[in-house]
């Protein structure tokens, strides 16, 4: 009886059938984790690039205007939606455009400000009619104006649904108007 058990044990130890299945079963979770995290990192990087491009595009297009009306801004917001494609800025993000100027030796003020999109959050530069919160080291000289475009997007990972992983991504771009001060919106 003991000899039979020993013989079967040695035969089982020499048998290599099924080892590939065991190795694949052990490696598959690691490979799947690498694949999904690679997709998520790529999506995160692409979204950041799209945000930077959208804020720079919006600020640049507004700064090129000789005059600007509400309807013009709506058309430019739609263009920003195309820049952000395949991400839905209208539902998950917000674009805020502000005209900031300084005159008479006072602080820089926000002349007008318009927002587009369904995401939360306002402007980091402040509110319309208020004193502008400018980035450290950035100065608007007396008699100058700038156009600031901010884009924020509520990022939620596709594969990891956790409140710790969700966050709001934010970027801004600042341009000087080229042909006019753009301190007022035309009717």
Image: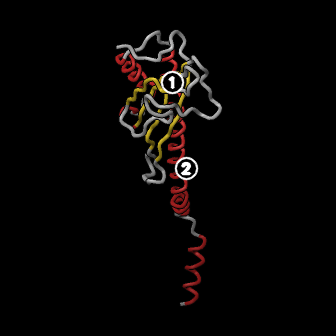
Residue at the (59%, 23%) spot, across then down: 105
Which of the two residues, 8 or 32, is positioned nearer the viewer here?
32
Compared across the picture, whether 81 is left or right of 109 comes to: left
Give the alpha-carbon distance from disc 1 to disc 2, as whole Å: 46 Å
Which of the two residues, 175 or 28, is positioned nearer the viewer here?
175
Colouring:
secondary structure
Residue at the (51%, 26%) spot, across then down: 148
Q: Which mark is residue 100?
A: 1
Q: Residues within 10 Å of mark 2 (few under 14, many from 20)?
A: few
Compared across the picture, whether 74 is left or right of 16 comes to: left
Q: Which mark is residue 34?
A: 2
Q: Secondary structure at mark 1?
A: strand
Residue 114, picture quadrant: top left
Q: Is residue 170 above or below residue 145?
A: below
Q: Residues within 10 Å of mark 1 (few under 14, many from 20)?
A: many
Which is more foreground, mark 1 or mark 2? 1
Image x and y of residue 178, in percent: 54, 12
Image x and y of residue 22, in percent: 53, 63
Which of the two residues, 25 or 70, is positioned nearer the viewer here?
70
Q: Is residue 68 above or below residue 8?
A: above
Q: Is residue 48 above or below residue 30?
A: above
């Amino acid at each position: 009886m003991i000899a039979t058990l020993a013989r079967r044990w040695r035969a089982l130890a020499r048998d290599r059938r099924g080892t590939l299945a065991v190795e694949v079963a052990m490696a598959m979770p690691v490979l799947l984790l690498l694949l999904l995290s690679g997709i998520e990192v790529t999506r995160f990087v692409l979204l950041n690039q799209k945000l930077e491009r959208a804020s720079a595009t919006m600020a640049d297009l507004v700064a090129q205007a000789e005059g600007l009306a509400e309807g013009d801004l709506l058309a430019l917001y739609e263009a920003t939606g195309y820049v952000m494609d395949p991400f839905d800025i209208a539902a998950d993000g917000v674009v805020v455009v502000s005209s900031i100027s300084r005159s008479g030796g006072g602080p820089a003020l926000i002349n007008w400000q318009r927002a587009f999109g369904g995401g939360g959050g306002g402007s980091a530069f402040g509110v319309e009619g208020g004193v502008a919160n400018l980035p450290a080291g950035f100065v608007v000289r007396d008699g100058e104006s700038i156009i600031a475009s901010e884009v924020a997007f509520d990022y939620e990972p596709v594969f990891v649904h956790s409140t710790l992983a969700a966050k709001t991504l934010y970027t801004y771009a600042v341009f000087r108007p080229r042909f006019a001060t753009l301190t007022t919106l035309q009717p």
